[in-house]
Image: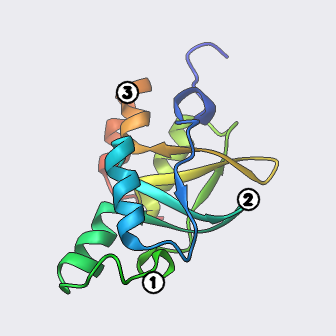
Amino acid sequence: MAGVFVVRDAMSKAIRSVRPTSSAHEAIEKMVKFNVGSILVMDGDKLHGIITERDIIVRIAEQCMDSRSVQAKEIMSRPVLTIDENTTLEEAARMMSKKNVKKLAVTREGKIVGVLTTTDIVRRSPQLIDVISRRQEE
């Protein structure tokens, strides 16, 4: 179908992650190094959570915690919503809006293969900004 984009067309294939026992400081360093707003918390192929910039602000900065003494598993958000790589971007945008999230872990046959953000969707399919920006009531 021409003009219909799927998640794999827009997702980032680079999976940036830390282990659950990594320090929050290590997660922050990787986010800065790779210029990303979130990082997955994984142990091998198993997804445990996600650390976002907001998690760092709310759980570390606001509470004046030392990021070197806090483990990733203590500040991560969970569960992480996942979406299959063959899902349409419109469906992904609706899911993000309904669940009020900005990032989804992308799967292929149950394995994490990438990350999709609202920015990725808007870059690939700008007309979906209206879907993302309004909260769906279903």
The residue that appears at 34% across and 77% down in the rendered structure is 68
Residue 86: image tag: none
Q: Would you call the spot at circle 1 few (<14 residues within 10 Å), some (14-19), or many (20 or more)? A: few
Q: Amino acid at mark 2?
A: Asp
Q: Amino acid at mark 1?
A: Glu
The answer to which of 80 and 57 lies nearer the viewer is 57
The answer to which quarter of the image holds residue 26 is bottom left
Q: Earlier in the sequence, mark 2 or mark 1?
A: 2
Residue 52 percent location from the top left of the image:
37, 62
Count of picture labels: 3
Q: Amino acid at mark 3?
A: Arg
**Residue wearing tag 1:** 74
Foreground mark, 2 or 3? Answer: 2
**Residue wearing tag 2:** 45
Image quarter in which the N terminus is found:
top right
User: How far apart are the alpha carbons under marks 2 and 3?
Assistant: 28 Å
Q: Is residue 46 above or below residue 85?
A: below
Residues at badges 2 and 3 in contact (C-beta under 8 Å)? no
**Residue wearing tag 3:** 123
